[in-house]
Amino acid sequence: MSSNQDHHPPRLARRDLLVAAASIVPAVVAGGALAQSAGTGAAPLAVDRHADGKAALVTGSSRGIGAAIARRLARDGFRVTVNYVRSQARAEEVVREIETGGGQAIAVQADVSDADAVRRLFDVGEAAFGGVDVVVANAGVMRLAPFGEMADGDFQHMIGVNMQGSFNTLREAARRVRDGGRIVTLSSSITRLRTATYGPYAATKAAQDIYASVLAKELAGRMISVNAVAPGVVDTPLFTDGKTPQQIEGFVQRTPHRRLGEPEDIANVVSALCGPDGDWINGEVVYANGGIV
Ligand SMILES: NC(=O)c1ccc[n+]([C@@H]2O[C@H](COP(=O)([O-])OP(=O)(O)OC[C@H]3O[C@@H](n4cnc5c(N)ncnc54)[C@H](OP(=O)(O)O)[C@@H]3O)[C@@H](O)[C@H]2O)c1
Protein backbone atom coordinates (compact mmCIF):
# COMPACT_ATOMS: atom_id res chain seq x y z
CA MET A 1 0.00 0.00 0.00
CA SER A 2 1.27 3.42 -0.82
CA SER A 3 -0.22 6.52 0.76
CA ASN A 4 1.38 9.02 -1.56
CA GLN A 5 1.38 8.59 -5.28
CA ASP A 6 4.08 11.02 -6.36
CA HIS A 7 6.37 9.74 -9.09
CA HIS A 8 10.06 9.27 -8.97
CA PRO A 9 11.47 12.66 -9.83
CA PRO A 10 13.51 13.46 -12.90
CA ARG A 11 17.17 14.26 -12.50
CA LEU A 12 18.25 17.86 -12.67
CA ALA A 13 20.24 18.48 -15.83
CA ARG A 14 22.82 21.27 -15.81
CA ARG A 15 21.08 22.97 -18.70
CA ASP A 16 17.77 22.95 -16.73
CA LEU A 17 19.45 24.81 -13.94
CA LEU A 18 20.99 27.30 -16.33
CA VAL A 19 17.54 27.85 -17.80
CA ALA A 20 16.19 28.27 -14.26
CA ALA A 21 19.01 30.65 -13.41
CA ALA A 22 18.37 32.69 -16.55
CA SER A 23 14.63 32.75 -16.07
CA ILE A 24 14.79 33.81 -12.45
CA VAL A 25 16.57 37.07 -13.08
CA PRO A 26 13.47 38.83 -14.39
CA ALA A 27 11.48 37.36 -11.47
CA VAL A 28 13.97 38.80 -8.99
CA VAL A 29 13.91 42.14 -10.73
CA ALA A 30 10.13 42.08 -10.88
CA GLY A 31 10.00 41.22 -7.19
CA GLY A 32 12.29 44.12 -6.38
CA ALA A 33 10.18 46.46 -8.45
CA LEU A 34 7.05 45.33 -6.62
CA ALA A 35 8.77 45.82 -3.28
CA GLN A 36 9.73 49.34 -4.24
CA SER A 37 6.28 50.12 -5.53
CA ALA A 38 4.53 49.20 -2.28
CA GLY A 39 1.70 51.64 -1.85
CA THR A 40 0.99 51.75 -5.55
CA GLY A 41 -1.31 48.76 -5.64
CA ALA A 42 0.50 45.67 -4.30
CA ALA A 43 -1.12 44.49 -1.07
CA PRO A 44 1.49 44.63 1.70
CA LEU A 45 1.61 41.19 3.35
CA ALA A 46 4.32 41.98 5.89
CA VAL A 47 3.43 41.67 9.54
CA ASP A 48 6.89 42.30 10.94
CA ARG A 49 9.57 42.44 8.29
CA HIS A 50 12.38 41.72 10.72
CA ALA A 51 14.22 39.75 8.07
CA ASP A 52 14.43 42.45 5.41
CA GLY A 53 17.55 41.92 3.34
CA LYS A 54 18.00 38.31 4.44
CA ALA A 55 17.53 35.22 2.31
CA ALA A 56 15.86 31.88 2.95
CA LEU A 57 15.87 28.62 1.00
CA VAL A 58 13.04 26.11 1.52
CA THR A 59 13.23 22.68 -0.11
CA GLY A 60 9.96 21.18 -1.33
CA SER A 61 8.08 24.47 -1.21
CA SER A 62 5.87 24.11 -4.27
CA ARG A 63 2.96 22.94 -2.11
CA GLY A 64 1.89 21.80 1.34
CA ILE A 65 3.87 22.74 4.42
CA GLY A 66 6.88 23.97 2.43
CA ALA A 67 4.77 26.43 0.41
CA ALA A 68 3.25 27.80 3.63
CA ILE A 69 6.75 28.19 5.10
CA ALA A 70 7.96 30.00 1.97
CA ARG A 71 4.98 32.40 2.05
CA ARG A 72 5.37 33.04 5.78
CA LEU A 73 9.13 33.66 5.62
CA ALA A 74 8.50 36.08 2.73
CA ARG A 75 6.00 37.94 4.95
CA ASP A 76 8.73 38.12 7.58
CA GLY A 77 10.91 39.87 4.99
CA PHE A 78 13.09 37.03 3.71
CA ARG A 79 13.83 36.75 0.00
CA VAL A 80 12.94 33.15 -0.70
CA THR A 81 14.30 30.41 -2.94
CA VAL A 82 11.33 28.12 -3.61
CA ASN A 83 12.37 24.59 -4.57
CA TYR A 84 10.38 21.90 -6.36
CA VAL A 85 11.15 18.63 -8.07
CA ARG A 86 8.26 18.34 -10.53
CA SER A 87 5.50 20.86 -9.65
CA GLN A 88 6.91 23.77 -11.64
CA ALA A 89 3.57 25.54 -12.06
CA ARG A 90 2.79 25.32 -8.35
CA ALA A 91 6.24 26.63 -7.45
CA GLU A 92 5.84 29.53 -9.85
CA GLU A 93 2.44 30.27 -8.28
CA VAL A 94 4.07 30.47 -4.83
CA VAL A 95 6.63 32.91 -6.29
CA ARG A 96 3.83 34.99 -7.83
CA GLU A 97 1.95 35.14 -4.53
CA ILE A 98 5.08 36.32 -2.74
CA GLU A 99 5.78 38.95 -5.38
CA THR A 100 2.19 40.16 -5.27
CA GLY A 101 2.65 40.73 -1.56
CA GLY A 102 5.71 42.86 -2.19
CA GLY A 103 8.33 40.16 -1.57
CA GLN A 104 11.03 38.57 -3.67
CA ALA A 105 11.28 34.91 -4.61
CA ILE A 106 12.60 32.57 -7.26
CA ALA A 107 11.62 29.01 -8.17
CA VAL A 108 14.39 26.48 -8.74
CA GLN A 109 14.00 22.84 -9.76
CA ALA A 110 16.24 20.39 -7.92
CA ASP A 111 15.88 16.82 -6.70
CA VAL A 112 17.19 16.94 -3.12
CA SER A 113 18.30 13.31 -3.31
CA ASP A 114 20.92 14.41 -5.89
CA ALA A 115 23.85 16.08 -4.10
CA ASP A 116 25.01 17.94 -7.22
CA ALA A 117 21.51 19.29 -7.79
CA VAL A 118 21.37 20.54 -4.20
CA ARG A 119 24.72 22.30 -4.62
CA ARG A 120 23.41 24.02 -7.74
CA LEU A 121 20.15 24.91 -5.95
CA PHE A 122 22.18 26.76 -3.32
CA ASP A 123 24.39 28.33 -6.02
CA VAL A 124 21.33 29.79 -7.75
CA GLY A 125 19.76 31.00 -4.50
CA GLU A 126 22.99 32.64 -3.36
CA ALA A 127 23.55 34.24 -6.76
CA ALA A 128 20.03 35.70 -6.73
CA PHE A 129 19.99 36.98 -3.16
CA GLY A 130 23.66 37.44 -2.23
CA GLY A 131 23.85 34.62 0.34
CA VAL A 132 21.63 32.50 2.54
CA ASP A 133 20.57 33.07 6.16
CA VAL A 134 17.85 30.47 6.67
CA VAL A 135 17.56 26.94 5.26
CA VAL A 136 14.50 24.76 5.79
CA ALA A 137 14.97 21.10 4.80
CA ASN A 138 11.30 20.39 4.21
CA ALA A 139 11.13 18.16 1.10
CA GLY A 140 9.81 14.75 2.04
CA VAL A 141 7.85 11.73 0.82
CA MET A 142 5.88 9.06 2.63
CA ARG A 143 5.13 5.45 1.72
CA LEU A 144 3.14 3.33 4.14
CA ALA A 145 2.95 -0.45 4.45
CA PRO A 146 3.39 -3.10 7.09
CA PHE A 147 6.95 -4.42 7.20
CA GLY A 148 5.93 -7.61 5.44
CA GLU A 149 4.50 -5.69 2.48
CA MET A 150 6.87 -2.74 2.04
CA ALA A 151 8.35 -2.67 -1.47
CA ASP A 152 12.10 -2.13 -1.88
CA GLY A 153 11.47 0.81 -4.22
CA ASP A 154 9.23 2.61 -1.73
CA PHE A 155 11.74 2.08 1.06
CA GLN A 156 14.60 3.34 -1.10
CA HIS A 157 12.59 6.36 -2.24
CA MET A 158 12.04 7.47 1.36
CA ILE A 159 15.72 6.91 2.19
CA GLY A 160 16.74 8.88 -0.91
CA VAL A 161 14.50 11.91 -0.36
CA ASN A 162 14.05 12.04 3.40
CA MET A 163 17.41 10.85 4.70
CA GLN A 164 19.87 11.48 1.87
CA GLY A 165 18.00 14.54 0.56
CA SER A 166 17.81 16.15 3.96
CA PHE A 167 21.48 15.32 4.56
CA ASN A 168 22.43 16.88 1.19
CA THR A 169 20.50 20.02 2.16
CA LEU A 170 21.89 20.26 5.69
CA ARG A 171 25.45 19.70 4.43
CA GLU A 172 25.14 22.67 2.09
CA ALA A 173 23.46 24.66 4.85
CA ALA A 174 26.37 23.90 7.21
CA ARG A 175 28.79 25.20 4.60
CA ARG A 176 26.87 28.24 3.45
CA VAL A 177 24.42 29.69 5.99
CA ARG A 178 25.79 33.00 7.21
CA ASP A 179 26.73 33.40 10.86
CA GLY A 180 23.69 34.19 12.98
CA GLY A 181 21.40 32.21 10.65
CA ARG A 182 18.93 29.42 11.27
CA ILE A 183 18.54 25.88 10.00
CA VAL A 184 15.33 23.86 10.37
CA THR A 185 14.61 20.31 9.27
CA LEU A 186 11.17 18.69 9.14
CA SER A 187 10.76 15.74 11.46
CA SER A 188 7.38 14.25 12.44
CA SER A 189 5.43 13.43 15.60
CA ILE A 190 5.17 9.90 14.17
CA THR A 191 8.57 9.32 15.80
CA ARG A 192 6.57 9.21 19.05
CA LEU A 193 3.22 7.89 17.80
CA ARG A 194 4.88 4.91 16.06
CA THR A 195 1.65 3.87 14.32
CA ALA A 196 1.54 0.57 12.38
CA THR A 197 2.67 0.88 8.71
CA TYR A 198 4.75 3.99 9.46
CA GLY A 199 7.99 2.18 10.45
CA PRO A 200 10.45 3.11 7.67
CA TYR A 201 8.95 6.60 7.22
CA ALA A 202 9.15 7.28 10.97
CA ALA A 203 12.77 6.09 10.96
CA THR A 204 13.68 8.62 8.25
CA LYS A 205 12.00 11.35 10.31
CA ALA A 206 13.78 10.30 13.52
CA ALA A 207 17.00 10.87 11.60
CA GLN A 208 16.07 14.56 11.38
CA ASP A 209 16.06 14.83 15.18
CA ILE A 210 19.61 13.45 15.28
CA TYR A 211 20.74 15.61 12.35
CA ALA A 212 19.50 18.78 14.09
CA SER A 213 21.04 18.13 17.49
CA VAL A 214 24.43 17.07 16.09
CA LEU A 215 24.62 19.90 13.55
CA ALA A 216 23.75 22.43 16.26
CA LYS A 217 26.88 21.33 18.12
CA GLU A 218 29.06 21.28 15.02
CA LEU A 219 28.17 24.90 14.23
CA ALA A 220 29.08 26.10 17.72
CA GLY A 221 30.45 29.62 17.81
CA ARG A 222 28.69 30.74 14.65
CA MET A 223 25.42 31.72 16.36
CA ILE A 224 23.46 29.46 14.00
CA SER A 225 20.53 27.69 15.68
CA VAL A 226 19.55 24.31 14.22
CA ASN A 227 16.27 22.60 15.12
CA ALA A 228 13.88 19.92 13.95
CA VAL A 229 10.15 20.72 13.77
CA ALA A 230 7.89 17.71 14.24
CA PRO A 231 4.33 18.25 12.90
CA GLY A 232 1.45 15.96 13.81
CA VAL A 233 -1.19 15.29 11.19
CA VAL A 234 -1.32 18.13 8.67
CA ASP A 235 -3.90 18.47 5.92
CA THR A 236 -1.73 17.86 2.85
CA PRO A 237 -1.75 15.07 0.26
CA LEU A 238 1.23 13.48 2.00
CA PHE A 239 -1.05 12.70 4.94
CA THR A 240 -4.50 12.38 3.33
CA ASP A 241 -3.72 10.41 0.12
CA GLY A 242 -4.67 6.77 0.47
CA LYS A 243 -6.61 7.25 3.72
CA THR A 244 -10.35 6.82 4.15
CA PRO A 245 -12.39 9.65 5.75
CA GLN A 246 -12.80 7.37 8.75
CA GLN A 247 -9.05 6.92 9.12
CA ILE A 248 -8.52 10.67 8.91
CA GLU A 249 -11.27 11.27 11.47
CA GLY A 250 -9.53 8.78 13.75
CA PHE A 251 -6.42 10.99 13.78
CA VAL A 252 -8.61 14.08 14.40
CA GLN A 253 -10.21 12.39 17.40
CA ARG A 254 -6.78 11.53 18.80
CA THR A 255 -5.82 15.22 18.59
CA PRO A 256 -6.97 17.24 21.64
CA HIS A 257 -7.59 20.28 19.44
CA ARG A 258 -9.94 18.08 17.34
CA ARG A 259 -8.78 19.16 13.91
CA LEU A 260 -6.06 18.40 11.39
CA GLY A 261 -3.14 20.78 11.40
CA GLU A 262 -2.97 23.31 8.59
CA PRO A 263 0.33 23.98 6.78
CA GLU A 264 0.23 27.50 8.29
CA ASP A 265 0.30 26.02 11.82
CA ILE A 266 3.73 24.62 11.02
CA ALA A 267 4.88 27.70 9.11
CA ASN A 268 4.15 29.81 12.22
CA VAL A 269 6.48 27.65 14.29
CA VAL A 270 9.25 27.74 11.67
CA SER A 271 8.83 31.53 11.45
CA ALA A 272 9.23 31.85 15.21
CA LEU A 273 12.39 29.73 15.19
CA CYS A 274 13.83 31.79 12.34
CA GLY A 275 12.87 35.14 13.87
CA PRO A 276 14.80 37.37 16.26
CA ASP A 277 13.32 35.65 19.33
CA GLY A 278 14.08 32.10 18.17
CA ASP A 279 17.81 32.22 18.76
CA TRP A 280 17.94 30.50 22.15
CA ILE A 281 16.18 27.33 20.97
CA ASN A 282 19.00 25.24 19.55
CA GLY A 283 19.45 21.52 18.91
CA GLU A 284 15.83 20.80 19.84
CA VAL A 285 12.91 18.87 18.41
CA VAL A 286 9.91 21.22 18.48
CA TYR A 287 6.63 19.27 18.44
CA ALA A 288 3.77 21.11 16.73
CA ASN A 289 0.81 18.77 16.66
CA GLY A 290 -2.25 20.10 18.53
CA GLY A 291 -1.40 17.71 21.34
CA ILE A 292 -1.67 14.34 19.55
CA VAL A 293 1.45 13.17 21.42
N1 LIG B 1 1.55 16.36 6.22
C1 LIG B 1 1.83 15.85 7.39
O1 LIG B 1 0.90 15.38 8.11
C2 LIG B 1 3.25 15.83 7.91
C3 LIG B 1 3.43 15.43 9.24
C4 LIG B 1 4.70 15.39 9.76
C5 LIG B 1 5.79 15.75 8.98
N2 LIG B 1 5.61 16.12 7.69
C6 LIG B 1 6.79 16.49 6.90
O2 LIG B 1 6.64 17.79 6.37
C7 LIG B 1 7.33 17.88 5.12
C8 LIG B 1 6.38 18.44 4.07
O3 LIG B 1 5.29 17.56 3.94
P1 LIG B 1 3.93 17.93 3.18
O4 LIG B 1 2.85 17.28 3.91
O5 LIG B 1 3.87 19.38 2.91
O6 LIG B 1 4.15 17.12 1.81
P2 LIG B 1 3.55 17.37 0.33
O7 LIG B 1 2.34 18.21 0.38
O8 LIG B 1 3.51 16.03 -0.28
O9 LIG B 1 4.72 18.26 -0.36
C9 LIG B 1 5.98 17.69 -0.53
C10 LIG B 1 6.93 18.71 -1.11
O10 LIG B 1 8.22 18.09 -1.22
C11 LIG B 1 8.68 18.20 -2.56
N3 LIG B 1 9.52 17.06 -2.92
C12 LIG B 1 9.20 15.75 -2.93
N4 LIG B 1 10.27 15.03 -3.34
C13 LIG B 1 11.26 15.92 -3.60
C14 LIG B 1 12.59 15.80 -4.07
N5 LIG B 1 13.11 14.60 -4.37
N6 LIG B 1 13.32 16.92 -4.23
C15 LIG B 1 12.79 18.15 -3.95
N7 LIG B 1 11.54 18.32 -3.51
C16 LIG B 1 10.79 17.21 -3.34
C17 LIG B 1 7.42 18.28 -3.40
O11 LIG B 1 7.76 18.89 -4.65
P3 LIG B 1 6.84 18.62 -5.96
O12 LIG B 1 5.55 19.37 -5.70
O13 LIG B 1 7.64 19.23 -7.06
O14 LIG B 1 6.66 17.14 -6.06
C18 LIG B 1 6.54 19.16 -2.50
O15 LIG B 1 6.88 20.53 -2.66
C19 LIG B 1 7.86 16.49 4.82
O16 LIG B 1 9.22 16.39 5.17
C20 LIG B 1 7.01 15.58 5.70
O17 LIG B 1 7.69 14.39 6.05
C21 LIG B 1 4.34 16.18 7.13
Image: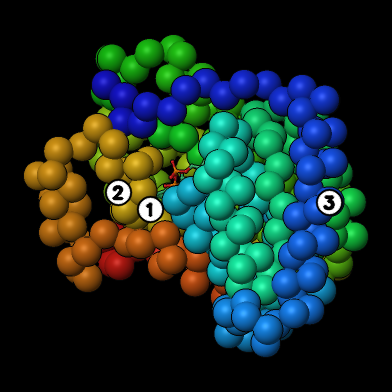
Query: What's under tag 3, amino acid-wise?
Result: Val
Q: Is residue 22 at all visible to an observer of this figure?
A: yes
Query: What's under tag 1, amino acid-wise?
Result: Ser
Residue occupied by mark 1: 189
Q: Is residue 228 at all visible to an observer of this figure?
A: no
- Asked whether the residues under the numbered discs 2 and 3 touch, taking CB atoms below 8 Å apart as contact, a structural biologist would say no
Q: Position of residue 285 (x, y in %)?
A: 52, 60
Quarter holding the C terminus is: bottom left
Q: Position of residue 243 (x, y in %)?
A: 20, 37
Where is residue 151, by image quadrant? Answer: top left
Picture layout, residue 271 above or below residue 152: below
| Residue located at (9% from left, 44% from top) | 246
| Residue located at (36% from left, 31% from top) | 4
| Residue located at (63% from left, 56% from top) | 95
- Asked whether the residues under the numbered discs 2 and 1 touch, taking CB atoms below 8 Å apart as contact, a structural biologist would say yes
Distance from Cα at disc 2 to Cα at disc 3 = 45 Å
Residue occupied by mark 3: 25
Residue occupied by mark 2: 193
SS state under label 3: helix
| Residue located at (44% from left, 12% from top) | 152
